Image (spheres, helix red, strand yellow):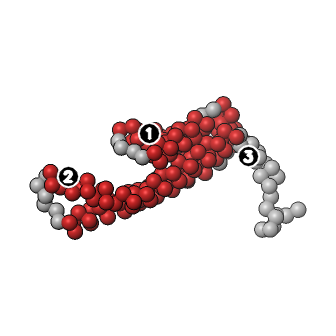
Amino acid sequence: MTESPNHPQSPASLGQAPAPPRPGTIEGAFWAFIAAPVIGLIGGLLIFADRDRIAAGLRDTDRQRGGNLTDAQLDQVVTVTMITAVVIAVVIAGLYLLFAFKLRAGRNWARIVLTVLAALQLLSVLTGQSTIGGYVAVLAAVVGVVLSFTGPSNAFFAAAKGQR
């Protein structure tokens, strides 16, 4: 029987081993790594509600340094700061999502990258000011890391590597 575009051959018929079964720990890690950036994005968008507090803090800082900025310049600085924060949150969320899907597909390098990102996120929360959303996002990322390094997860990554 010949292969047609409507009926591609299965991996088994091509001599490839089927994908290893994905354990629940990988599914849990995947969803934890999905939750972390979603929570982070929500926090990033909530920054717009703090515009007045951010502006007041910048005005106080400017006055302590001699007060060289006008109100219009301070408003521009606040706007640029807020937009930059949201853009950074979106980029980080996109990377988290990409790596979470790669983790789910059995890519060990994605597990390592997500572990590094979670460690950096944890350091950021521990060394700076954070919101409850920041703490929850870090907690989700840490749960994802722990789940991705359990015994069933390690076996999944080994089987996935052996398949390639």
* Label annotation for residue 61: 2
- Name the image quarter holding the N terminus: bottom right
Q: Can residue 146 be seen in this view?
A: yes
Q: Identify residue type, mark 1.
A: Leu
Image vertical order of residue 127 relative to residue 41, above or below: above
Residue to which mark 3 is pinned: 19
Q: In this view, does 155 lie to the left or right of 97?
A: right
Which secondary structure, mark 1? helix
CA distance separating discs 2 and 1:
27 Å
Q: Residue 20 in the image: x percent, y percent?
A: 73, 42
Q: Identify residue type, mark 2.
A: Thr
Q: From the image, state whether disc 3 or disc 1 is nearer to you.
A: 1
- Circles 2, 1 touching at the beta carbon (< 8 Å): no
Q: From the image, state whether disc 2 or disc 3 is nearer to you.
A: 2
Residue to which mark 1 is pinned: 122
Q: Identify residue type, mark 3.
A: Ala
Q: Residue 110 in the image: x percent, y percent?
A: 55, 45
